[in-house]
Structures are given as C-alpha cells and as structure tokens.
Amino acid sequence: MSAPSQTPWPSLTGTRPARLLSLDFLRGLTIAFMILVNNNGDEQLAYWPLKHAAWNGFTPTDLVFPTFLFLVGISTVFSTASRLAQGATKQTLFLHVLRRSITLYLVGLVIHSFPFFNPHTMRFYGVLPRIAICYFVIASLYILSPGWRSKAVLAVSALAIYWILMRFVPVPGYGVPTHDIPLLDRDANLTAWLDRQLFSASHLYEHTRDPEGLLSTIPALATALFGVLTGIWLRTQRTLNQKITGIAIAGLSGILLGGLWNLSFPINKKLWTSSFVLFAGGLSLSLLALSLFLVDLPGKKPAKQDHSGVLKPFFIFGTNAIVAYAFSELFAAAIASIHVHSGVNLQQSIFRTILQAVPNIPFASLLYGLAFVAVCWLFVAVLYRRKIFIKI
C-alpha cells in the first residue's frame, strides 16, 4: 500500500475537466451497495434484492462485484495510459502493477484472517484476491499492447473456453454434465471439483466450493477485459454523446445475449458463468451510460449546486473505494468478535435493539445495513476532508 496521497482528488468544481467524474460516482455507488448487501442485519431474512441468488438466477446484489471489476478494467486503461504518456517505461509499469497486485492480494488475506489468524482456516480466494489476479493480467496485457482487438479476442475466448469446460468436460468422479450429472450441479461441477483438489473444506468459503474459485477466474477476466475495452472506447476522440450511445448499445446487446445464453447455460454468479458475464456486463455498461449522461454530459455536471448535494456522498465513497471496502470488512469482523454476553455478539445485539424498535425483520435488517454504510461513509469522509487518498 502506498503512502496516503496529500494531492487533492479532482474536485467537483471541474478543475480537471478531462476526468470523467461519472467513474468516481459509479464506483462509489457500487461500493456503497456492496457494503449494504454484505452487512444485512439478518442475511437470511433480508429483502430479496439485498441477497445473492441462491444458485442459478440473478438479483441486484449479483451485479455489485462484476460492476466493480468492470470499473477496475476502465480505471486500468486511464491510469496506465497516463503513466505511459508521462514517459514511464514498460518495465517500470509492470513492476508497479506487480507490487499493487501483491498488495491487493495480501490485504485480502488480512481481511479473511481478521481478527483471529488461523492458518488452518485461512481463505485464499475472495473479492480482493480475484481483483488482484484480474488486475495483474489486464494491466500487463494493456502495457504490452494498448490496442483493443487482442482484448476483444481474449474476452470472447475466455467465455467460450469456460463454457466448453463447464458443459463438455467430465467432472472426475461424477461424469459428463447433462448426461451423468445436471449442468451446473452445486458440487458436481468442474469449478468446485478443482477447488476441492487445491484446498481442504476449511479453506473454501462454502466448504465444498468457493464463489471466487480458480477456474471461474477465467470468465472474471472477461468481465475485467470488457472494462478495458470500455476504457479504450472512452479515450477515443468521439464526442461524449457518441460514447454514451455506443456504451448504451453495447449494454443492451450484453443483456440480450446473456439472456439468450441463459436458456442453455444458466446465469450463475457463484460460478461466474459466461451468460452471467454478458448479462451483468450489459447492466454495468447501461449503468455507466446513465452515469455519464447524468454526471459528465455538458449542462449536467454535479459541480452545479443542484446535483452535488445528492451525488457527492457517492463521489466520496468512490475516492477511496478499496479502503472503504476493507474498512467495512474489518469493522464487521470486529463487532462480530465482541461478545456482549453469552452467545450474543455486538452485531447481533445492535440488530436486536433495532428489531425491538422496528418489529419487522426485513426492514430492521435494511436499517441495520444503512446504519453500517453510514459508519463506513463517515470514515471515508474524514479521509476525503483531509485530502487523504490511499492508493492500494
């Protein structure tokens, strides 16, 4: 993790007009929703949009991680292109990418180990480890060749290869999908099988499988590469209206193609299926097009007083997004480890207090989540006010 930067983040008054503030806004919105859905008061009885799909299917919560990974791809293009323009060598950039990837991965391990380190139950997969791997691959590819064609071919190839692996390759000990076993069976699938060969049950998030497992990183790379392609598109000389139109068309295409592929290869976030990549990618593109229209289109900038008050909280989240996520995970683990009395931890005690005032479990769960988001926002707001922007 690099030292905190004392250089002010581009303000909402447009001192650096070339910067697309919509990226900061959408990143902040995504992180805020990610923290909310990760911290329901009662995960089992929360409103359905605030929970992941049980297996096949899709909920708004399933859009959070792919959207953030998509934005990582866009940001990688802008940051790498800027460093290249400033005269950085490819070797220097590669070392920077390597250091940052290792840091992200290690931060992920720290989060999984907090507050009680146990090497026998440490999880080696996870959100930040997946981001670290995807970032390393896409940034290295962009450093080697900033063109779009190779990225498009790789993204499509990743989706096709993963489909072939999951659809036609026999799962050792189980058989061939759709013949001997159901397609995308919860445990009898190639992704889950491979994770069990690499790690024991105590190291896997769901014991028999992990939603951020090794094999499903292949289609996750496609998600990040779609972000890279979008970043390349945004850096072209087209007008902003043309860029928004192109992104909106691509978004609609992704939604339609993902929906069609879902008929034979179900949308599944936990397996990160190819249809899921297209469907979620289409929605992410659509959200980006809407954000560009609302935030960056001339005459609609949030620098204007009527926009800044509503949108600024999300900009603040977006300035320290990874830090906000890491803080939320550590804070949640901390309050869950503090026992106020036998069998009840601090998190449960707070939720029960809310539930007594609001005797409706889903609504009380939402209130708890919103309060948790507010605490995380206050932490990031202090950093923002002090112009501290921690780059991981």
Image: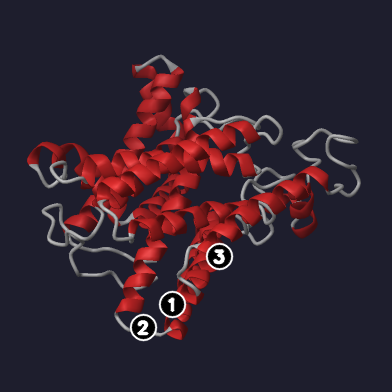
Secondary structure beneath dot 2 equals: loop
Q: Residues within 10 Å of mark 1 (few under 14, many from 20)?
A: few
Disc 3 marks a residue whose amino acid type is Ser
Quadrant for the C terminus, please: bottom left
Classify residue 343 by image quadrant. Answer: top right
Find residue 118 and report its image quarter: bottom right
Q: Residue at x 68, y 50 (%)?
A: 160
Q: Which mark is residue 150?
A: 3
Residue identified by numbered label 2: 88
Instruction: Kindly report the distance in space between the C-alpha atoms of the residues bearing marks 1 and 2.
Output: 10 Å
| Residue kind at label 2, given as amino acid type | Ala
Q: How crowded is mark 3: few (under 14 residues within 10 Å), some or many (20 or more)?
A: few
Select label 3 or label 2 by which is in front: 3
Tell me the quadrant of the picture where the N terminus can be found. Answer: bottom left
Judge from the rendering whether residue 236 lies leftward or rightward of residue 339; answer left or right: left
Q: How far apart are marks 3 and 2 (CA)?
A: 23 Å
Q: Which of 32 and 361 is in front in this view?
A: 32
In the structure shown, which secondary structural element does the residue marked by tag 1 occupy? helix
Q: Name the residue under label 1.
A: 96
Label 3 element class? helix
Image coordinates of residue 162 in percent, x first then y, are 70, 50
User: Looking at the image, which residue is at 17% across and 56% down?
Assistant: 385
Task: Look at the numbered discs 1 and 2 and tell me whether their residues touch, using CB distance below 8 Å.
Answer: yes
Residue lying at the far left of the rendered structure: 305
Query: In x, y percent, where is residue 218?
Result: 64, 56
Q: Earlier in the sequence, mark 1 or mark 2?
A: 2
Mark 3 or 2 closer to N-term? 2
Distance CA(mark 3)–CA(mark 1) = 23 Å
Circle 2 crowding by C-alpha within 10 Å: few under 14, some 14–19, many from 20: few
